[in-house]
Structures are given as C-alpha cells and as structure tokens.
Image (spheres, rainbow, N blue to C red):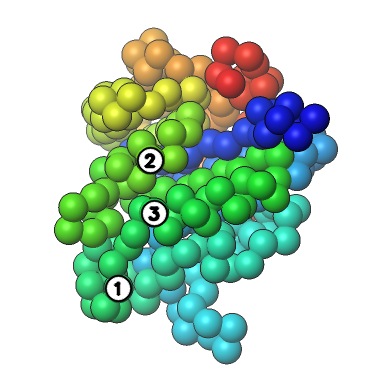
Amino acid sequence: MLFIKSIMKKAYFITGTDTGVGKTLVACALLQAFVKQGDKAVGMKPVAAGCMETPAGLCCEDVESLRAAGNVVASRELVNPYALISPVAPHIAAERAGVEVSLEQIDRSFRQLREMADVTVVEGVGGFVVPLNARQDTADMAEMLGLPVILVVGMRLGCINHALLTAQAIRHKGLRLVAWVANRIDPDMSAFDENLHALETRLAAPLLGIIPYQAEVSSAPESGLMDLNILNSSKVK
C-alpha cells in the first residue's frame, strides 16, 4: 500500500518566461485548485531574494502566499530553504549573504515536503536559466528535481520568442513541458488573440488557463481558471 501511495504523489515545477510574469500567482492558484479537488497540497520556493527581516526570521511575500494557498502545515525553512535579503539575482544575493545555494539541500527539503502531501508545487525564481551559484542555475535545479514543468507566459510584446526559447531550454534539460498558462500582464497588449493562437500552435503543450489582467493581484479567483483535467490526465503523469 505504501508503494502504491508513493506512485500517486504528484509534483510540478513552475517556471516563467521572465521575472515578474506571475509564477507565484499561478502556483498559488494551482495549490488552491488542488485543495478544492480534495488533495493535500503544499508549495515550495527553494530560493527567494528580496526577503524582509521579521521577528520570525527572513520572510518573503511569495513564500507566505504559497504557504497560505496550500493545506499542509510545513515549516518556512522547508518551503523556502534559501531566504535572501538583497532583491537581486539569487547568486548575487547569496554571495552578499555569505552563503552558497546547494541543490542537494533543496532536494532534501523537496523530498521531505513531498512525503507530507499528495501534490507539491515548486516555484522557480526568475526565468528558467537563472544562476544560483558559481556553477549551477535554476535549469539545473529543475533537472535535479526531474518534475514535469508548467510554463507561465507573461503576455506582452516579445512573449512568443521568450516562450519558445524557454520551452527549448526545458526540452534541452530532458524535462517535459506538460502545460502552460497565459497571464495577461499587459492590459494594452496588441493582437492578444493572435499571440495566444501562435503560442498554442507552437508550444506543443496544452493551455492550462488564461489569467486576465488584474491591477491588484489575487490568486483566489484564478484557482477556477486552472483546468486540472489537463494535469490529471494520464498523458502528463
């Protein structure tokens, strides 16, 4: 029975075409959707830069959003093994903090979280290939975890090129792009429908949802926009 249960556990890696395209929004929406489906769901953000000092330690708004969106109680240290103060690229923030991001430590934390939940949603940092230390980047982290990837595309001018290059990098690491999300971050984007169609025909992965532009970000309504039937399909397991 324990062996069967471990096979049924699911996990996904959330990446984006750039920084600020809505990875946390999508990760939280997915967590809430899985919770509504009756799953035990937990989020993880292995590396977070731009954290604030609080009485409880270094905290990041994205990390707290992930913790609130899931229904598994997990320590902040497991959800976010590397909390960094400087709001810069993570390898620079880590250098300033005098620490080195270890993929092995991230893997250990991920495995502990995965044992606690039915579904684990891991959010990357920035785009898909962001340096984490002198030798490794977020693509290496995704490769180590070996999870199916969900790509968040920030819908704005240039998004087609960014999305296709990211999909190419994902495949180059031997990973599966199982779905993508269109997040309308530019309300004035020209030819939105045409760009959406171009991505649907070129990304070779199903569209998981379209998030409309919102001036004030809230993941609660977006949970209903995620088509979990796509992720529940045997084709992406």
- Residue at 59 percent across and 83 percent down: it is 56
Q: Is 78 placed above or below 175 here?
A: below
Compare residues 158 and 162 and report the one nearer the observer: 162
Instruction: Judge by depth and name the residue closer to the eye, 223 or 14.
Output: 14
Q: Nearer the viewer, residue 176 or 151?
A: 176
Q: Amino acid at mark 1?
A: Val
Label 1 packing within 10 angstroms: few (<14), some (14-19), many (20+): few
- From this viewpoint, is residue 140 visible? yes
Q: Residue at x 47, y 84 (%)?
A: 53
Q: Earlier in the sequence, mark 3 or mark 2?
A: 3
Residue sitting at 62 percent across and 24 percent down? Answer: 231
Q: Say whether residue 184 is visible.
A: no
Q: Looking at the picture, which amino acid does disc 2 mark?
A: Met
What secondary structure is marked by label 3?
helix
x, y (%) of residue 10?
A: 62, 33
Residue drawn where x is 30% and y is 41% of the image: 139
Residue 83 place in picture, x, y as percent: 43, 70
Query: In the picture, which quadrant includes the N terminus?
Result: top right
The residue that label 1 is drawn on is 99
- Residue on which the image places disc 2: 144
Q: Which residue is mark 3?
A: 104
Which quarter of the rendering shows the C terminus? top right
Secondary structure at badge 1 equals loop
Q: Position of residue 233 (x, y in %)?
A: 64, 16
Q: Element type at marker 2?
A: helix
